[in-house]
Image (spheres, rainbow, N blue to C red):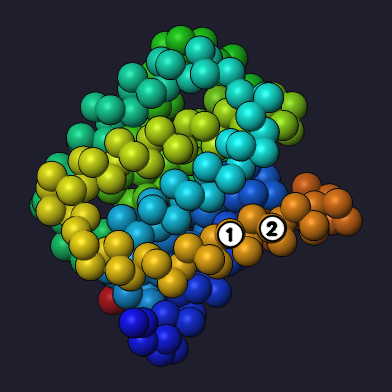
């Protein structure tokens, strides 16, 4: 049914790496995978990445289900809806080179956010703003984690992973719904994603093993290096 050529195999490896990072630190699948997959084939971004993120988030949300506070995510979900619509509209007007620049810029922004020492209390207004930014970034580039991670980063590890996962389950569905209506999500994207889903699960499983032996800080540094490299590469491609 599937032609496992070099392009598909590379995409599978990238998804494994992204899923590993997301399961280990709470977010990062799209930050790691989207710019690299875009270099492999622009068709992988954003819909296939979002589909994999949806299923990966289900695994993590179930694992950390006792740490999820749905009520605290309500305003972020409300903000995600108009943000996703705005992100979907953007895709109607951007070229492949502009999208590459946008992806690279979003990844570098994610790295910058990760390094900021600023502490934001998750008030209702801030959660709504973070949700809107997450929707805009996530629907247009599949990279919607950084705004929410910035707001929730000072929660304990289980709460951070659980709440981010729960948010991504709902927000991925919203983004796919919007992408369908702007013509950026169709049956071919589902077919392309099927070989990637097992790698998303394997990345999740691998993270559960590795985090017992490797500190979260080392995984974070490794992730930032990958993101910085892939972000710069995407920008260079967009400018070429």
Residue closest to the far right: 213
Which of the image's four quarters has the C terminus? bottom left
Work out whether residue 23 or residue 217 is closer to the camera in this orientation and state it: 23
- Viewer-proximal residue among 15 and 199: 199
Residue sitting at x 48%, y 49%: 55
**Where does label 2 land, which residue?**
205
Q: Can you say whether 179 is above or below 196 in the image? A: above
| Location of residue 18 by image quarter | bottom right
* Percent x, y of residue 207: 72, 56
Q: Look at mark 1 in the image and give the residue it sits on.
A: 201
Distance between the Cα atoms at labels 2 and 1? Answer: 6 Å
Coordinates of residue 238 in the picture (x, y in percent): 30, 68
Residue contact between numbered discs 2 and 1, judged by CB atoms under 8 Å = yes
Q: How many other residues sit within 10 Å of disc 1, few (<14), some (14-19) or many (≥20)?
A: many
Q: Is residue 86 above or below residue 232?
A: above
Q: Which label was assigned to residue 98?
A: none
Tell me where residue 102 appears, x and y as whole percent.
32, 54
For label 2, count other residues whose C-alpha is less than 10 Å away and answer few (under 14), some (14-19) or many (20+): some
Instruction: Tell me residue 17's x, y (percent).
Output: 60, 65
Q: Is residue 152 above or below residue 223?
A: above
- Identify the image quadrant of residue 209: bottom right
Q: Secondary structure at mark 1?
A: helix
- For residue 62, say whether it is visible: yes
- The answer to whether residue 72 is above or below residue 16 is above
Q: Residue furthest front?
A: 1
**Residue found at the very far top of the displayed protein:** 124
- Determine the residue positioned at 42% across, 86% down: 4
Q: Is residue 154 visible?
A: no
Callout 2: helix, strand or loop?
A: helix
Question: Residue sitting at 74 percent across and 27 percent down?
Answer: 156
At x 55%, y 25%, the residue is: 151
């Amino acid at each position: 049914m599937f032609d496992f050529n070099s392009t598909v195999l590379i995409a599978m490896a990238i998804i494994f790496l992204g899923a590993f990072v997301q399961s280990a630190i709470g977010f990062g699948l799209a930050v790691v995978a989207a710019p690299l997959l875009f270099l492999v084939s622009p068709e992988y971004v954003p819909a296939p990445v979002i589909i994999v993120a949806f299923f990966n988030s289900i695994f993590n949300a179930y694992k950390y289900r006792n740490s999820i506070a749905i009520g605290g995510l309500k305003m972020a979900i409300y903000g995600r809806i108009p943000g996703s619509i705005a992100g979907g509209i953007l895709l109607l007007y951007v070229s492949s080179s502009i999208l590459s620049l946008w992806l690279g810029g979003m990844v570098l922004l994610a790295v910058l956010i990760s390094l900021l020492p600023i502490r934001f209390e998750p008030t209702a207004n801030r959660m709504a703003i973070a949700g809107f930014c997450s929707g805009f970034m996530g629907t247009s580039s599949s990279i919607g984690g950084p705004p929410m991670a910035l707001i929730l980063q000072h929660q304990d590890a289980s709460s951070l992973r659980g709440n981010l996962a729960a948010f991504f389950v709902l927000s991925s569905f919203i983004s796919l719904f919007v992408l369908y209506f702007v013509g950026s999500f169709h049956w071919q994207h589902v077919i392309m994603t099927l070989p990637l889903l097992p790698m998303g699960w394997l990345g999740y499983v691998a993270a559960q093993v590795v985090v017992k032996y490797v500190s979260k800080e080392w995984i974070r540094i490794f992730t930032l290096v990958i993101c910085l490299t892939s972000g710069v590469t995407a920008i260079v491609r967009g400018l070429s």
